[in-house]
Image (cartoon, helix red, strand yellow):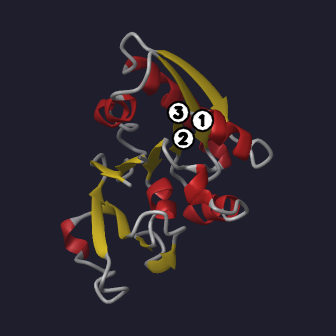
Amino acid sequence: MTKFILHGGFDKNKEYIRDEFFKNVLENTPKDVKIFLVFFAELKEYLELRIEQCKEQFDKNKGSKNLEFKMASEKNFLEGSAWADIIFLNGGRTANLLESLKKFQNIDQIFKDKIIAGDSAGVNALGHSFYSRKTKEINKGLGILPFKMIVHYSDDMGNPLLEVEPDLETVFLREYETKIFYQ
C-alpha cells in the first residue's frame, strides 16, 4: 500500500514546513530510512536553502531513526525511487515538476508501496487536476491520486474546481495543513 502525505504549502515569509508533517512522513518507518529528495520544482535561488531546511526538519523529527538522503535528478530518478522508502516531492513551480515527472512512464507503479510526501507543487503533481492560486489557472496533474487539488487554500477562494470533473472530490489544503491518503 502506498501512503501519501500531502502538505498545503508554507508562507515563505513566515517559516518552513512544520514538525507535524515530518512526523507523519516518518511514522511507522523502519529504524534505517532511505529518503529520496525530489526538488525539481524548486526555484534555483531557493534550492540550497530548501534542501538544508528539509534535511534539518527530517533530522529534528527522526527520533532514534537513522536517515540516509539522496538527491533526485532526472538521470537517477528510477534508481533512486526504487532505493527509497520515502520520496519527498518538494514544492515550487508545479510546471517544472510535471515536466520532469512526465518523462517517466508508469509513475504510479514507481511510487507503489512507498511513502510519497508532497508539499504544494508536489501535491498538485499527484492529483488529477489542480488550481494554481498564483496564476488562477486550472491544470492537469499526473492523476496518481483521484482528486482535484487546491493548495495554499483559504476560505475566500471558494471552490474554483467545482465545475471541473464533478465526479472527483476536491482536496483543500491550507498552508501548513497535512492530509494523509492510502492507495
Residue annotated with mark 2 = 87
Amino acid at dot 1:
Phe
List the single residue furthest toward the right: 75
Mark 3 element type? loop
Residue annotated with mark 3 = 85
Residue 32 to residue 179: above or below: above
Quarter of the C terminus within the rendering: bottom left
Residue drawn at x 43%, y 78% as measured from the top left? 136
| Residue 152 placement, left or right of 84 | left
Q: Which quarter of the figure has residue 104? A: bottom right
| Residue 102 placement, left or right of 151 | right
Which of label 2 and label 3 is nearer to you? 3
Closer to the chain start, of discs 2 and 1, is 1
Amino acid at dot 3:
Asp
Residue 112 picture location, percent across and down = 52, 49
Image marks 2 and 1: residues in contact by CB distance under 8 Å: yes
Residue 108 picture location, percent across and down = 55, 58
Q: Characterize the local packing of mark 2: few (<14), some (14-19) or many (20 or more) Cα atoms within 10 angstroms.
A: many
| Residue 175 placement, left or right of 65 | left
Mark 2 element type? strand
Residue drawn at x 45%, y 72% as measured from the top left? 128
Q: How far separated are the C-alphas under marks 2 and 1?
A: 5 Å
Mark 1 element type? strand
Tag of residue 36: 1
Residue 57 picture location, percent across and down = 43, 26
Q: Which quarter of the figure has residue 79? A: top right
Residue drawn at x 29%, y 58% as measured from the top left? 173
